[in-house]
Image (cartoon, rainbow, N blue to C red):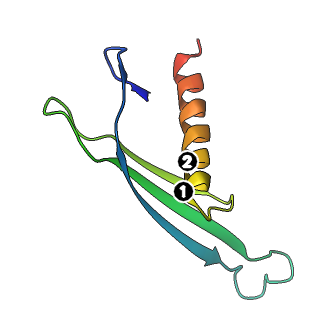
Amino acid sequence: MFVNREGELISTTLALRVKTIDLHPPIGKEAQSPDTTITFISAIEAETPDNREPIRWSFITNLPVKSKKDIKQVLDWDIYNYIDIATSD
């Protein structure tokens, strides 16, 4: 569920793409920095009304993302943070 520009609550379906990569420290810095796994999540609104562009989000996280439940949790956290920031005075 999302709130549009008019303040209306809308429901939509998102098409998701997920890519996980391992980042390695620069040569010579291996001892100071460990490898890090990063997950990129792309969420695009699958069915868009004619009166607006599709909703598109890109997320980068170092949290483990191994299932649809993990993806939903990352999206929920980010959306909650966005709503909190957007509605604060």
Q: Amino acid at mark 2?
A: Lys
Q: Amino acid at mark 1?
A: Lys
- Badge 2 is on which residue? 72
Instruction: Please tell me the numbered disc located at residue 68.
Output: 1
Q: Which of the 4 image quadrants contains residue 9?
A: top left
Residue positioned 79% across, 81% down in the render: 29
Q: Is residue 67 left or right of residue 34?
A: left
Judge whether 86 appears above or below 75 on screen: above
CB atoms at circles 1 and 2 under 8 Å apart?
yes
Extreme-right residue of the structure: 31
Judge whether 89 appears above or below 77 on screen: above
- Image quarter where the C terminus lies is top right
Extreme-bottom residue of the structure: 27
On the image, the x and y values in percent for residue 41 come to 49, 57
Residue positioned 37% across, 47% down in the render: 14
On the image, the x and y values in percent for residue 20 come to 56, 71
Q: Is residue 62 left or right of residue 46?
A: right
Judge whether 60 appears above or below 47 on screen: below
On the image, the x and y values in percent for residue 37 come to 67, 70
